Image (cartoon, rainbow, N blue to C red):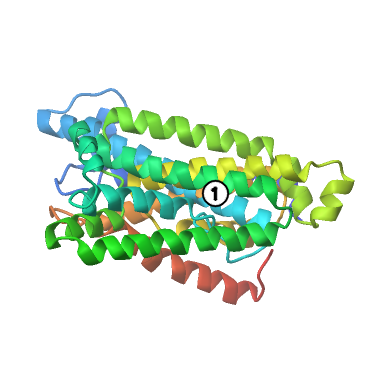
């Protein structure tokens, strides 16, 4: 175990790394803006090129803030699922909630010709895709909550969640088979994931969703710590399994479903960052893990988004691919170095 003092120092280092990652992300992009000009603008100064101000305030800062929300939220939802199911391979997608968001997006993008009722969503413009994905994730979350009320076995709930994911993936495959090439391409581009296509109103809504998910996670700290020692031990401590499990599912649904709805399905972060954090902090205490996992997830997403933005180029690499290419070797190296998995 590491002393409380060491934890404080570690969190100080994480905050410094987060700020540096934030500045690096804001100063990088298709338009070359000198780093000193970016710093000057952030600290209240003025820069001579008006277009640079517009790019930084209206595009790069919202995108960086979205990266923090997406990375932190996905990492935290992965921690919740790994603790609830006591399974190191669990992630934010095991309950099928993110698959529900993908189904909602697929119905809008590829099912317009098959389900004319969804055409009304296109009237809402840019927000229609997020609304369709949100509806899909909410419906799956509702079904999972109803199932969670009826069964007592947590592992059975995990299997049911995986089955929901399989069902929704099968429906998406059928839609893809009958879809036109243009609509299929639109869905594929959405599945790459993106943190740079949100309006200010969508960023605010995503912030509220992530905040609520984080709040429910903090309220579940006692039950999460108890779950690590088994459900019978948690009951002996006075933890209501049904109530606590439902709260964790709702928190995960808000985080994973909301983020997938607005940013698309982004892999790896929710699965790997909790393991990365445990390796570094060497603790299972959720009072430490919850903020640490959120911050590490935010840093990883900021760095991956920076790499995805090819310097001085209008091309942007798929963030979904960058997260795995960058993060997986780091986790492999840590596991080989530690020679054990802390769980």
Residue annotated with mark 1:
77
| Residue 190 shows in this picture | yes
Other residues around mark 1 within 10 Å, as few (<14) / some (14–19) / many (≥20): many
Residue depicted at 36% across the width and 40% down the height: 66
Q: Residue furthest right?
A: 236
| Image location of residue 45, percent across then percent down | 24, 24
Residue depicted at 30% across the width and 35% down the height: 62
| Image location of residue 204, percent across then percent down | 37, 28
Q: Quadrant of the N terminus?
A: bottom right
| Image location of residue 131, percent across then percent down | 33, 37
- In the picture shown, does residue 214 fall above or below 200? below
**The image quarter in which residue 217 lies:** top right
Q: In which quarter of the image is the C terminus?
A: bottom right
**Front-most of 280 and 142?**
142
**Front-most of 166 and 51?**
166
Residue depicted at 61% across the width and 60% down the height: 158
Residue depicted at 19% across the width and 38% down the height: 122
**Front-most of 245 and 66?**
245
């Amino acid at each position: 175990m590491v002393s409380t003092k060491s934890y404080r120092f570690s969190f100080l280092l994480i905050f410094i790394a987060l700020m540096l990652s934030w500045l690096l992300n804001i100063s990088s992009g298709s338009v070359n803006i000198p780093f000193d000009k970016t710093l000057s603008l952030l600290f209240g100064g003025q820069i001579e090129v008006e277009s640079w101000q517009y790019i930084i305030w209206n595009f790069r800062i919202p995108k960086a803030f979205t990266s923090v929300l997406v990375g932190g939220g996905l990492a935290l939802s992965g921690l919740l699922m790994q603790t609830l199911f006591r399974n190191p391979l669990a992630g934010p997608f095991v309950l099928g909630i993110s698959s529900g968001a993908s189904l909602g997006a697929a119905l809008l993008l590829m099912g317009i010709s098959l389900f004319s009722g969804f055409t009304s969503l296109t009237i809402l413009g840019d927000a229609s895709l997020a609304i369709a994905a949100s509806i899909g994730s909410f419906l799956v979350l509702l079904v999972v909550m109803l199932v969670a009320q009826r069964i007592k076995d947590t592992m059975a709930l995990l299997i049911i969640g995986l089955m929901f994911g399989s069902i929704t993936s099968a429906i998406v495959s059928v839609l893809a088979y009958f879809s036109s090439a243009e609509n299929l391409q639109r869905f594929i581009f959405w599945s790459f994931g993106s943190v740079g296509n949100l309006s200010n109103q969508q960023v605010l809504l995503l912030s509220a969703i992530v905040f609520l998910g984080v709040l429910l996670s903090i309220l579940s700290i006692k039950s999460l710590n108890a779950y690590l020692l088994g459900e019978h031990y948690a009951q002996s401590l006075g933890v209501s399994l049904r109530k606590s499990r439902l709260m964790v599912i709702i928190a995960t649904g808000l985080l994973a479903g909301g983020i997938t709805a607005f940013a698309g399905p982004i892999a790896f972060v929710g699965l790997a960052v909790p393991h990365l954090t445990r390796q570094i902090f060497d603790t299972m205490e959720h009072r430490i893990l919850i903020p640490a996992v959120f911050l590490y997830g935010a840093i990883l997403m900021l760095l991956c988004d920076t790499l995805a933005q090819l310097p001085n180029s209008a091309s942007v690499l798929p963030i979904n691919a960058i997260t795995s290419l960058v993060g997986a070797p780091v986790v492999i190296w840590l596991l080989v170095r530690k020679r054990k998995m802390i769980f």
